[in-house]
Image: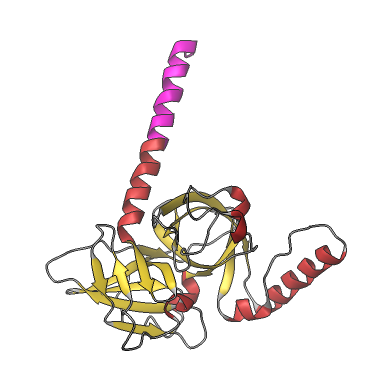
Amino acid sequence: MLSKIEKKIFSVFILNLVLVSCGLEQDTDQKTTVLIRGRNGTGSGVIIHKDNDIYSVLTAKHVVGIQPGKIDDPYQAITHDQVNHPIKNIRKDPKLDLAIIEFDSPGKKYPVAKLTKSLFENKPVHISGWKDCSQKGYEFNTGKILNIVKSKEEAVTYIKNLNKKVQNQENNDIENYKEDDYQEGYNVKYTNPTIRGMSGAPVFDDKSRVIAIHGKPGLDKENSYDFGSCLPLSENLGNNWGISINKFLSSSLRQSMKLEVED
């Protein structure tokens, strides 16, 4: 039997291990997360592939939805070391709200994120992205998976249940999820709070593997956030939607890329 002092020491030891683990996860995930800057604002993305000096970043298609003209500055990918990389190529999926952007970095190496097909409700996850603040604040927060919509039929049922809650006045907050969202790939809902600028942000599991790409708010509460102060996000900005890695792996974007994918 442990004494009270020994129990207290053991509890502090476990807490420190958890804090160290969270710190390592954040450091690892931030190094693969990029800030994407274009004429429509900012977005986020994650490095998923490297071919010699060319890096491929997975993001949401609407982040790079408008091709820059001659007058406009081209899109840029800003890596964790604050280096600006002009984007050389953009590939967009015709159906899903996903895109691949490419930049080259001769002589400069960056880590590549692992992907996973593992997806289930209540799975602990964390999100890594850049808020569209005046300070361009990095955001890392934890949560869990709430829902997984596996088919068009499930999407229709989910939407019907949302409409019933509105009609019965069970919920004052109206969630903005439509059948078109499912068609664009949005099939994973999580508790993690997000805000403008975090579209394209990777959603990681507790092994720092990407399980989804964020891109859609569940509730439009953006007006409640002070972009000037750029504080960490609160829970009221949670319950958002992403596109699972499984959808990406079945898309036109994968092509012949050799990716680190785990079950």
Q: What's drawn in magenta, residue-wise?
A: 1-18
Inspect this view and state whether residue 260 appears.
no
Q: Is residue 76 found left or right of 145 in the rendered image?
A: left
| Residue lying at the far right of the rendered structure | 168
Q: What's the residue at 24%, 57% (across, down)?
A: 81
Instruction: Say above or below: 133 vs 243.
Output: above
Residue at 30%, 83% in the rendered image = 89
The mark total stands at: 0
Image position of 247 with respect to 229: above or below: below
> Residue 156, position in %: x, y?
73, 76
Q: Nearer the viewer, residue 206 or 175?
A: 175
In screen coordinates, is 174 left or right of 69?
right
Location of residue 138 with respect to 24 vertically, above or below: below
Residue 164 is left or right of residue 46, and the answer is right
Q: Position of residue 252 (x, y in %)?
A: 42, 86
Name the one closer to the observer, 22 or 1: 22
Instruction: Please provide percent x and percent y for residue 107.
Output: 11, 67
Q: Quadrant of the C terminus?
A: bottom left
Q: Nearer the viewer, residue 148 or 37?
A: 37
Magenta segment, prevailing SS (helix, strand or loop): helix
- Quarter residue 110 falls in: bottom left
Query: In the rendered image, is residue 185 in sight?
Result: yes
Position of residue 220 measured from the top left corner of the image (x, y, whole percent): 64, 63
Residue that appears at 55% across and 76% down: 185
The answer to if 51 sits in the magenta stretch is no
Residue at horizontal 36%, vertical 65%? Answer: 35
